[in-house]
Image (cartoon, grey):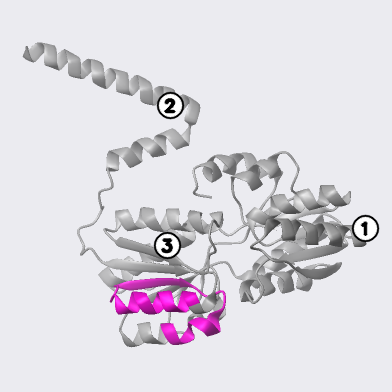
Amino acid sequence: MARLRTWAGIALAGALTVSLAGCSDTGGKRAEDARKAAAAQGRAAVDTPRWTFAMITHSGDGDTFWDIVQNGAKQAAVKDNINFLYSHDDEAQQQAQLVDAAVDKQVDGIIVSLAKPDALKAALARARKAGIPVITVNSGSAQSKEFGALTHIGQDETVAGEAVGEELNARGRKKAVCVLHEQGNVGHEQRCDGIRKTFDGTVQNLYVTGTSMPDVQSAIEAKLQADKSVDAVVTLGAPYADTAVKAKRGAGSKAEIDTFDLNAKVAASLKDGTLGFAVDQQPYLQGYQAVDLLWLYKYNDDVLGGGKPVLTGPQIVTEDRAAALEEYTQRGTR
């Protein structure tokens, strides 16, 4: 009986090996990552206390960009034995109330985006008074230090905009439209201003209602119909790139569509030439690093950045890099 069990175990192990090998052959790195995740079984890599970290962002509902940020934060939280709480609201005052709620819960650390920094100032002052360490992510790098954050993790939005302007120059573009889908977001304004700073042509801002894709499409389409000289449209978020493509077709325009941020749809559209280029700020890294750096601060009083932002971008992604990144976008890490 013991021998039968042994041979049965060997047969099962062999079957699993074949199965995993087959998955690896067809699924590549995704299959290998899935195997490692299953093997880890959600166990922490450290034995430090189970601290609670809260991330509060300005994301609206269904924003895939912030799904990627969360994926990074959650993986770091598992590794660091962290109880991770996530909440969001695209209304600045509501976001501030969520920060207040995290302070009231006496969490051990707060991660927050500062798209509309003035609205968050008082709430972060409360966190500082309560002795709760704060790391800012994604937006608000200019206000991060002033508000008492340990560091800021993200891309410098002005620098990112400047990179776009230079890329548009390299592509011979002359007239660009910068589509702002969230009025009052300081990072969005900085992106368009950065484009204007380095672009040899002209840049016009187009404000749209980002919560309604039909409105976004009609606004871009109307702009392209009214001005046939526009040869580049730059959207400030990956979900809006496909909408801009539809608007371009509706207007019969030949403008190139480019975008900030990356997701699976953008990677596929870069690969087939529907989009010209994308600016990747590596949102997965923003979430992962934020949790990891808070853990390092709690565990070892470490602070990264030397008083300067920890930059995760920009990286210009074009057709030649899209295929390599598409696999990662499909698994939700790029």
Residue 262 at x, y = what percent?
61, 52
Mark 1 lies on residue: 228
**Number of the label disc, if any, that sits on residue 155:** none
Q: Quadrant of residue 287?
A: bottom left
Q: Which numbered disc, 3 or 2, marks the residue closer to the eye? A: 2
Residue 220 relative to residue 185: left or right:
right
Residue 285 relative to residue 103: left or right:
right
Magenta residue check for 104: yes
Mark 3 lies on residue: 289
Residue 98 at x, y = what percent?
41, 74
Q: Amino acid at mark 3?
A: Gln
Question: Which quadrant is home to the N terminus?
Answer: top left
Looking at the image, which residue is at 10% across and 12% down? 3
Q: Which numbered disc, 1 or 2, marks the residue closer to the eye? A: 1
Mark 2 lies on residue: 23
Q: Which numbered disc, 1 or 3, marks the residue closer to the eye? A: 1
Q: Amino acid at mark 2?
A: Cys
Q: Residue furthest left?
A: 1
Residue 162 at x, y = what percent?
71, 68
- Mark 3 and mark 2 lie on one chain; the one further toward the N terminus is 2
Q: Residues within 10 Å of mark 1 (few under 14, many from 20)?
A: some
- Mark 1 and mark 2 lie on one chain; the one further toward the N terminus is 2
At mark 1, the secondary structure is loop
